[in-house]
Image: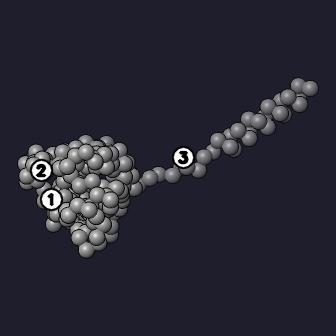
């Protein structure tokens, strides 16, 4: 009887070791993939800053916003943002998106501030290039193994492409540029 329990005990001990060998534990994620994931998570976390402003007349009301980040062949991180204006509101209202709306969208997503005055919709200088860089350093590029020089190079190579889709496709606009530049082209 003791031999039977000893054999049974060894059998369970061996099968547990075989089951516990998880192939994902041996996988290593690249720094590029990790940064892409951090951008996607940061966008998801702060997306409510952009959508939840139906009562705020200073910004466009969006019905949907999506963003994806990916490194290209030139080692640049490209963030593509697609924002769809609320169809029910902007089919009736004669408002056409402007370049400042791209900047407001980017600023609101990163800092929580639009960078434009409430009434005149002119730049109010509350969001600076340093503010945008600091958000990137604190939220995205805060990886222990990266030096300050590497972080600054990554920030320089981070680009954004924003497409604001109007209900009338002819009025849609797109803006792009370095993520930290104050006015996108």
Asked whether disc 1 touches disc 2, contact meaning CB atoms under 8 Å apart, the reply is: yes
Quadrant in the picture for residue 142: top left
Q: Who's the residue at 51% across and 52% down the image?
A: 27
Kindly give the residue lying farthest to the front in the view shown.
92
Residue 55: x %, y % from top left? 25, 45
Q: Is residue 72 above or below residue 52?
A: below
- Indicate which disc, 2 or 3, sits on the residue closer to the N terminus: 3
Which x, y percent locates residue 129? 13, 51
Measuring 20% from the left and 64% from the top, which residue is drawn there?
A: 94
* Residue shown at the point (31%, 45%) measured from the top left: 52
Give whichever of discs 1 and 3 has the lower sequence position: 3
The answer to the question of whether label 1 and label 3 lie on touching residues, with beta carbons closer than 8 A, is no
Q: Which mark is residue 100?
A: 1
How many numbered marks, from 0 up? Answer: 3
Based on the displayed image, in which of its 4 quarters is residue 14 positioned?
top right
The residue sitting at 25% across, 74% down in the picture is: 170
| Residue at the spot of label 3 | 25
Measured in 3D between alpha carbons, the distance from the residue under mark 2 to the one under mark 3, in whole angstroms, is: 47 Å
- In this view of the protein, can residue 81 be seen by the observer? no
């Amino acid at each position: 009887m003791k031999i039977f329990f000893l054999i049974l005990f060894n059998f369970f001990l061996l099968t547990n070791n075989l089951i516990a060998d998880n192939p994902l534990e041996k996988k290593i994620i690249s720094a590029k993939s990790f940064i892409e994931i951090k951008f996607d998570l940061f966008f998801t976390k702060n997306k409510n800053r952009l959508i939840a402003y139906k009562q705020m007349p200073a910004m466009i009301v969006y019905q949907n916003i999506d963003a994806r980040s990916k490194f290209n062949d030139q080692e640049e991180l490209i963030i593509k943002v697609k924002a769809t204006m609320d169809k029910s509101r902007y089919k009736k209202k004669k408002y056409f998106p402007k370049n400042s709306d791209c900047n407001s969208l980017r600023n609101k997503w990163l800092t929580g501030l639009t960078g434009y005055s409430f009434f005149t919709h002119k730049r109010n200088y509350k969001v600076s290039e340093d503010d945008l860089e600091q958000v990137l350093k604190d939220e995205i590029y805060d990886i222990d193994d990266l030096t300050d020089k590497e972080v600054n190079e990554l920030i320089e190579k981070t680009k954004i492409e924003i497409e604001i889709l109007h209900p009338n496709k002819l009025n849609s606009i797109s803006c792009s540029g370095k993520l930290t530049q104050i006015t996108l082209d």
